[in-house]
């Protein structure tokens, strides 16, 4: 409307120069008719639900300006466009825009004439054509400036892009229409009868121009269709749907595109700007108007994956070419959706198989393969993100659950164990089930190796509470082994070391044990050592060193413990932890035990002959106690060396309780009855210390070195030592502390009532001759002493309550706990 006002104002401003004439009405009528014909002869373009037209109006306006006064042309333009709008029944807003735009074009052309200052019409044909060309150029540019932004707004494209669209065809059309206008003007001035040729010429040019526009449009449409179908060749369903929605909205100039999938009840909607809805089918849309459906089916129409719908806010009728394009697009989309769905299903099945291959079917935890793969990858970058450690967890006596309640109940327990471990682990940890009742936790990115032990305690503490199983509460104990990443070796070595530590914990009766290379009997060399055992026994390669046991108060030697070593010709001196297990499995245990016992008894005889009647202690394998012939062999060796039985102490370990205890009872009872003294080694480290004392008539308890080492810093360790000493006094048993390394430890043990001890404070293990020389040399002028006494001779010493109790007379007969 503003354009109309401006154009009318320009017309009024120029009316003063127009002479009055009786032919005004006929001239204006002719101009109105010419403008109306220019508006009727047009090329249509649909954008979404709106149809835009490109006509010959600017040509009619320029011809009118060449033949009539400008004000009449402005008025005639408005009247002509209004008449055409009424005939075509355009909406009010479309009619107003058409009238305003064309009237403003006419007013702009008139304004150009006024600015040129030429007398109208100008003299001379060429002057007329030059002025007319300038006016036509301004009118054409003004027509584009007013129309194209509206088209860009309706299509959702940028104005610059819309200006470039068909620019060559628009420029050619403008040139042709100007030529038509110029020829018409020349014909009018030359011979008006030739005007009869103008309508066919205009019609021919119009048809050629329209055909060219349609051809270009269809070519671009097919090119866009080809690009769109190529873009649909992806395997991700979300990408397929997004591409289809946005490209279909642009390809068919739709306000909204909807894709409904049969499988899964999924509906996707959107436009050129992207997806606006992605959810379940049945949700209403905000776009009302024309709906053009297209089933998503193959060329043979046997597969129907869904429906494609084009939505327009107003009435729209697709052309035949657009309908064919829509069917082609729908068929390509159907193929793309089927391919994407097939790929998704294939990927899902592959993921399920990959998950099943890397996870335990019962618990959902990672399996051994996944643990090894993850661990191998972690060890390759272990220096970059902290310390890596592995905790191996095994359920103790789990077979009893399966045997008593059945495997189904056992499976339920395993599932609950997995859930607890998963809940107690850190987010960065990998929890795995290796098989049976064995679990593992791979710890990654630890700030320090010591943190692994703390986290392992947390994991095992999670299994402490009883498990609920069909109304029953079942307690399950577990043992754990910890190993840090080895400096050399991969994940298999890390797993092996954790396994070694776990079995160390089981043998020691501990809940958790950390891998120690010195206690690793499962190294590769053990296999080769087993083959060397027969030769080693035959060639007497096993040697015995002795560590003295001394009176903590006086420092005098009271006995000595025999410690076996293998003097291998190739590997040198080998610790017993590396070969004892191989000896036990080899069948050479009796010969090995006899060889060690012989050397120990020979040493005791040599000490006695030198004036030091010192008993000797020998460690006994639990397997030897299962041999009924063992007592006879021991007694035979004692007689052969003419040594009283009470000069021999056999040290036992708590692991013998895992064997046939009835056989052990008979073997030990015979040895005790013959006078051989028995000692219980590593007391307090196992599960069954007290129950063992009620069955085996031992004479001596040996406190494990782990308690002695930490007694000054750990109240728990000190309490264990104190309670062991009280137990020894109650049962009239000697108590020996192992691992005494310092004078403060010696004094603290003596004040608690411990009589004897052994450790590096007094002497390291040494050959029998070296020990004899040390006893002969003595300490402080006292032969047989290896350390100074705690108090000077003859000093009056105030004894603690513990020492007073320790000094009470012992009963004639050794009391025993009831069996």
Image (spheres, helix red, strand yellow):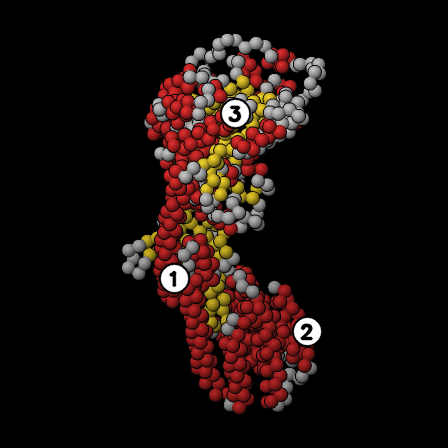
Residue drawn at (37%, 66%) of the image: 320
**Residue 29: image location, x then y, percent:** 54, 75
Task: List the residue tagged with mark 1.
Answer: 329
Q: Is residue 562 above or below residue 140?
A: above
Q: Is residue 371 visible?
A: no
Q: Residues within 10 Å of mark 3 (few under 14, many from 20)?
A: few
Task: List the residue tagged with mark 2.
Answer: 13
Q: Are marks 3 and 1 in contact (CB under 8 Å)?
A: no
Q: Decide which of 499, 743 is in the foreground and name it.
A: 743
Q: Residues within 10 Å of mark 1 (few under 14, many from 20)?
A: many
Query: Is 800 displayed left or right of 64 in the figure?
Result: right
Q: Give the Cα distance between marks 3 and 1.
A: 111 Å
Q: Give the Cα distance between marks 1 and 2.
A: 57 Å
Q: If you read the primary sequence from the N terminus, does the residue marked by circle 1 or circle 2 appear first?
A: 2
**Residue 247: image location, x then y, percent:** 46, 61
Q: Is residue 659 above or below residue 435?
A: above
**Residue 299: image location, x then y, percent:** 31, 61
Q: If you read the primary sequence from the N terminus, does the residue marked by circle 3 or circle 2 appear first?
A: 2
Task: List the residue tagged with mark 3.
Answer: 609
Q: Give the Cα distance between marks 3 and 2.
A: 150 Å
Residue drawn at (55%, 23%) of the image: 611
Residue drawn at (59%, 19%) of the image: 755
| Label 3 SS | helix
């Amino acid at each position: 409307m503003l354009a109309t006002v401006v154009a009318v104002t320009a017309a009024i401003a120029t009316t003063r120069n127009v002479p009055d004439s009786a032919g005004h009405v006929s001239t204006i009528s002719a101009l109105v008719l010419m403008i109306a014909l220019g508006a009727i002869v047009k090329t249509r373009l649909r954008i979404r639900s709106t149809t835009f037209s490109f006509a010959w109006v600017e040509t009619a306006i320029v011809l009118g300006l060449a033949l009539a006064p400008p004000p009449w042309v402005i008025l005639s333009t408005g009247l002509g466009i209004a008449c055409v709008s009424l005939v075509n029944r355009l909406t009010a807003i479309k009619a107003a825009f058409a009238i305003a735009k064309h009237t403003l074009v006419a007013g702009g052309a008139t304004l150009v004439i006024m600015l040129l200052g030429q007398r109208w019409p100008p003299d001379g044909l060429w002057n007329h054509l030059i002025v007319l060309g300038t006016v036509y150029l301004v009118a054409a540019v003004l027509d584009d400036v007013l129309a194209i932004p509206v088209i860009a707004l309706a299509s959702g494209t940028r104005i610059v892009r819309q200006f470039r669209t068909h620019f060559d065809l628009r420029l050619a059309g403008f040139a042709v229409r100007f030529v038509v206008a110029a020829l018409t003007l020349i014909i009018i001035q030359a011979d008006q009868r030739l005007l009869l040729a103008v309508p066919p010429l205009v019609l021919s040019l119009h048809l050629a121009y329209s055909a060219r526009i349609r051809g270009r449009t269809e070519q671009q449409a097919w090119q866009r269709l080809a690009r769109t179908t190529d873009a649909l060749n992806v395997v991700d369903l979300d990408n397929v749907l997004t591409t289809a929605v946005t490209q279909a909205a642009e390809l068919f100039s739709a306000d909204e595109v909807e894709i409904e999938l049969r499988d899964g009840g999924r509906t996707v909607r959107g436009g050129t700007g992207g997806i606006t809805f992605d959810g379940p089918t049945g949700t209403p849309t905000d776009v009302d108007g024309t709906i053009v459906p297209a089933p998503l089916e193959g060329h043979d129409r046997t597969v129907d994956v869904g429906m494609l719908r084009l939505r327009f806010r107003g009435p729209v009728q697709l052309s035949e070419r657009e309908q064919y394009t829509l069917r082609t697009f729908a068929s390509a989309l159907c193929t793309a959706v089927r391919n994407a769905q097939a790929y998704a299903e294939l990927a899902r099945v592959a993921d399920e198989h990959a998950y099943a291959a890397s996870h335990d079917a019962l618990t959902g935890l990672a399996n051994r393969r996944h643990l090894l793969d993850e661990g191998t990858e972690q060890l390759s970058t272990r220096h970059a993100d902290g310390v890596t450690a592995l905790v191996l967890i095994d359920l103790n006596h789990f077979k009893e659950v399966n045997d008593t309640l059945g495997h189904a109940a056992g499976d339920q327990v395993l599932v609950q164990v997995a859930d607890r471990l998963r809940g107690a682990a850190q987010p960065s940890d990998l929890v795995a089930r290796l098989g049976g009742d064995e679990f593992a936790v791979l710890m990654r990115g630890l700030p320090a190796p010591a943190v692994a032990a703390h986290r392992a305690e947390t994991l095992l503490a999670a299994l402490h509470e009883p498990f609920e199983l069909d109304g029953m509460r079942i307690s399950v104990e577990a043992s754990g082994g910890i190993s840090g990443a080895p400096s050399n070796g991969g994940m298999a070595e890390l797993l092996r070391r954790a396994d070694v530590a776990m079995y160390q914990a089981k043998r020691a009766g501990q809940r958790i044990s950390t891998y120690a290379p010195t206690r690793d009997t499962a190294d590769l060399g053990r296999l080769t050592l087993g083959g060397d055992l027969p030769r080693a026994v035959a060639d007497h390669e096993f040697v015995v060193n002795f560590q003295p046991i001394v009176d903590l108060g006086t420092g005098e030697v009271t006995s000595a413990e025999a410690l076996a070593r293998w003097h291998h010709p190739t590997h040198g001196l080998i610790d017993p932890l590396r070969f004892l297990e191989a000896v036990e499995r080899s069948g050479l245990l009796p010969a090995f035990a006899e060889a060690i016992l012989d050397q120990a008894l020979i040493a005791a005889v040599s000490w006695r002959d030198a004036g030091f009647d010192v008993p000797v202690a020998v460690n006994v394998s639990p397997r030897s106690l299962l041999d009924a012939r063992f007592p006879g062999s021991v007694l035979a060796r004692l007689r052969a060396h003419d040594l009283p039985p009470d000069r021999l102490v056999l040290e036992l370990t708590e692991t013998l309780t895992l064997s046939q205890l009835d056989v052990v009872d008979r073997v030990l009872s015979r040895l005790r009855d013959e006078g051989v003294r028995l000692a219980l080694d590593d007391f307090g480290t196992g599960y069954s210390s007290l129950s063992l004392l009620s069955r085996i008539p031992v004479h001596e308890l040996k406190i494990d070195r782990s308690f002695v080492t930490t007694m000054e810093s750990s109240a728990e360790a000190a309490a264990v030592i104190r309670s062991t000493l009280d137990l020894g006094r109650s049962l009239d048993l000697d108590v020996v502390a192992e691992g005494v390394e310092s004078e403060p430890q010696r004094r603290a043990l003596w004040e608690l009532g411990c009589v004897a001890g052994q450790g590096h404070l007094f002497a390291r293990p040494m050959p029998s001759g070296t020990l004899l020389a040390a006893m002969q040399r003595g300490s402080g002028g006292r032969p047989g002493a290896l350390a100074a006494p705690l108090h000077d001779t003859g000093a009056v010493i105030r004894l603690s309550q513990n020492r007073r109790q320790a000094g009470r007379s012992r009963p004639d007969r050794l009391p025993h706990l009831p069996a």
